[in-house]
């Protein structure tokens, strides 16, 4: 074997051995929080369960926001702590892991533990989609403020219910149930907005190909959320998580950055 072939063989062998070290594994962390709610005389078990879940959810999302804020992957987004908390609430699902009703010294309580699974790669992708869409940012901020206001109203009603008669409690409980419904609707709207973006991403990856015209792209994806251009020849359209890039009027790339570098199209 000649010296040249030996060197080529060693380079190929080294590349083959080292290449797996460049694959970045997905990292998922389960974050939990526990809350105990002391039931009043006018609370049903279902009321107590809903109140306890909201408080436990608030705690776990705050912890998740702190974890996400420390992630180096999102530092370039330059988000405030309040924005991170709001967007975290929009992109994460929270589920109950345990709940326990108990009675001690004449007080009935419910203790609930909830968890949120934080997939750092997925969260980064969803946060990038929000950061790229100013209208979505404003919508989430408004909805989150509305939720906070409703939660404060609910806590105020809880105090009133603890100090009122059974007859007067009926109307207060009806008012609190309306608040529960309003909070649920706002949470659903936030999740729907995020899912709309991720759904658009799947459509781009499945159907947008090189040399497609702008008209063809628009017929598939609809109106872009944002755009940028260099002169008349280079143009990028944003659809949340991804940009579609054109040279002239033909597609040349798809990617997470406005000039499609890196380019996902082969």
Image (cartoon, rainbow, N blue to C red):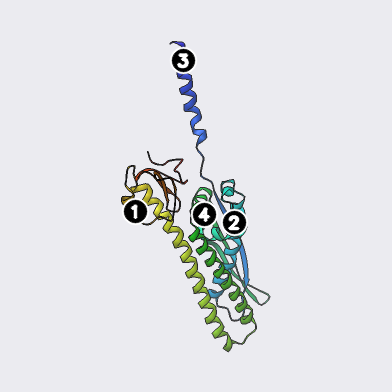
C-beta proximity under 8 Å, tags 1 and 4:
no
Where does the image place residue 57, in percent across and percent down from the top left?
57, 63
Q: What element carries label 1?
A: helix
- Which of the two discs, 3 and 1, sits closer to the camera? 1
Q: Where is residue 85 in the image (x, y as percent from the top left)?
A: 58, 59
Q: Which one is in front, 76 or 36?
A: 76
Residue 250 position within the rendered picture, expressed as x and y whole percent measured from the top left: 34, 44
Query: Can you tell which of label 2 and label 4 is closer to the viewer?
Result: 4
Quadrant (top left/top right/bottom left/bottom right) for the C terminus: top left
Residue at 51 percent of width and 35 percent of height: 22
Between the residue at mark 3 and the residue at mark 1, the CA separation in whole angstroms equals 53 Å
The CA span between labels 1 and 4 is 22 Å
Numbered badge on residue 131: 4
| Picture layout, residue 153 above or below residue 195 | below
Looking at the image, residue 214 sits to the left or right of residue 28; the answer is left
Disc 3 designates what residue? 6
Q: Which of marks 1 and 2 is in front?
A: 1
Q: In which quarter of the image is residue 253?
A: top left
Residue occupying image coordinates x 46% and y 23%: 12
Quick one: label 3 or label 1, which is nearer the N terminus? Answer: 3
User: Badge 2 is on which residue?
Assistant: 65
Q: Mark 1 points at which residue?
A: 218
Q: Nearer the viewer, residue 34 or 10?
A: 10
Residue drawn at x 48%, y 19% as measured from the top left: 10
Query: How far apart are the alpha carbons under marks 2 and 4?
Result: 16 Å
């Amino acid at each position: 074997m000649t010296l040249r072939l030996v060197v080529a063989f060693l380079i190929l062998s080294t590349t083959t051995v080292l290449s797996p070290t460049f694959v970045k594994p997905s990292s998922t962390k389960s974050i939990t929080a526990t809350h105990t709610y002391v039931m009043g005389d006018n609370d049903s078990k279902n009321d107590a369960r809903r109140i306890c879940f909201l408080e436990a959810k608030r705690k776990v999302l705050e912890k998740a926001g702190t974890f996400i804020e420390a992630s180096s992957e999102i530092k370039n987004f330059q988000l405030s702590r309040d924005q991170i908390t709001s967007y975290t609430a929009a992109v994460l699902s929270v589920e109950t892991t345990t709940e326990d009703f108990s009675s001690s010294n004449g007080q009935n309580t419910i203790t609930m533990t909830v968890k949120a699974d934080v997939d750092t790669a997925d969260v980064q992708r969803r946060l990038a989609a929000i950061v790229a869409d100013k209208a979505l940012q404003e919508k989430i901020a408004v909805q989150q403020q509305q939720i906070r206001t409703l939660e404060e109203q609910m806590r105020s009603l809880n105090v009133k219910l603890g100090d009122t008669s059974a007859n007067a409690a009926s109307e207060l409980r009806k008012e609190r149930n309306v608040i529960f419904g309003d909070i649920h609707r706002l949470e659903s709207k936030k999740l729907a907005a995020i899912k709309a973006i991720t759904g658009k991403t799947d459509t781009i990856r499945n159907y947008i190909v090189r040399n497609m015209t702008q008209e063809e792209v628009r017929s598939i994806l609809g109106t872009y959320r944002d755009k940028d251009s260099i002169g008349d020849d280079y143009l990028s359209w944003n659809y949340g998580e991804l940009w579609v890039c054109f040279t002239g009027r033909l597609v040349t790339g798809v990617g997470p950055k406005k000039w499609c570098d890196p380019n996902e199209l082969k």
